[in-house]
Amino acid sequence: MKKLHGEDHLRRYLRFELDRYLQGRGNTGGAAEPTLTRVDGQDYVTYRKGALAMYLLQVRLGENAVNHALRTLLERYRFKGAPFPRSLDLVAAFRAEAKTPEEQALITDLFERVTLYDLKTIGPTATRRSDGRWEVTVPVDARKIYVDAKGNESEAPLAERIEVGLFTAEPGRDAFDARDVIVMERRSLHSGAQRLTFVTDRKPAYAGVDPYNYYIDRNSGDNVQPVP
């Protein structure tokens, strides 16, 4: 899809998958959600969450690294009998490509835990400076949640680099494309409220955290807000 239609179209599709995943979580009747390494038949996890996890993985590790992991696993097991590959073997292949502790932690969160985020942008502002440039402030509130095998939620310390962007159009809309990106940077975020500052030549119309919905956010609709 990325090759045929471009990343903007693909991101809109992944937003649809995120909504379907969250809808699936809400329709389980209280049943605990399995991790991706333990999933067995729950389509909202396998197909919906699986697509989101694999996309973020290739964003962070690189598409070539993820393809190399998949190729290595296939070459190791194809045309062979038992023992057959398990989900743990797939995760091990991804870990072999991860180069930093941050990437290893991401693999744990994506495949071995049920991890949710609450990322919110609140009232971004833009002020014209004396040199004609714009100082943009993006207030962000961030939370990270782990869900255990019984469905109980607990807040986990958040200390990750997550994308924050400034735009001349709203990401995810049909008219949006790469020309609308003023700034897109990975910034270090922590749990709770924080203020991020940028200086740009153009005044943004929108600003927000995780604007492309890479992460499984329980309310992705408040990630990006208009800049008055």
Image (spheres, rainbow, N blue to C red):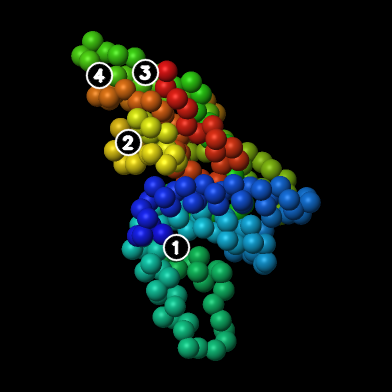
Above or below: residue 74 compared with residue 96? below
What residue is shown at x 36% (from left), y 53% (from top)? Answer: 6
**Which label belongs to residue 218?**
none
Q: Amino acid at mark 3?
A: Ala
Task: Determine which residue is flagged by label 3.
Answer: 126
At label 4, counting other C-alpha atoms closer than 10 Å, the crowd grade (few under 14, some 14-19, many 20 or more) is some
Above or below: residue 164 compared with residue 24? above
Residue lying farthest to the front in this orientation: 175
What residue is shown at x 42% (from left), y 34% (from top)? Answer: 170
Task: Determine which residue is flagged by label 1.
Answer: 95
The mark that comes first in sequence, 2 or 4, is 4
At label 1, counting other C-alpha atoms closer than 10 Å, the crowd grade (few under 14, some 14-19, many 20 or more) is many
The residues tagged by marks 1 and 2 sit, at their Cα atoms, a distance apart of 32 Å
What residue is shown at x 38% (from left), y 39% (from top)? Answer: 175
The residues tagged by marks 3 and 2 sit, at their Cα atoms, a distance apart of 16 Å
Q: Is residue 134 shown left or right of residue 36?
A: left
Task: Determine which residue is flagged by label 4.
Answer: 133
Task: Determine which residue is flagged by label 2.
Answer: 181
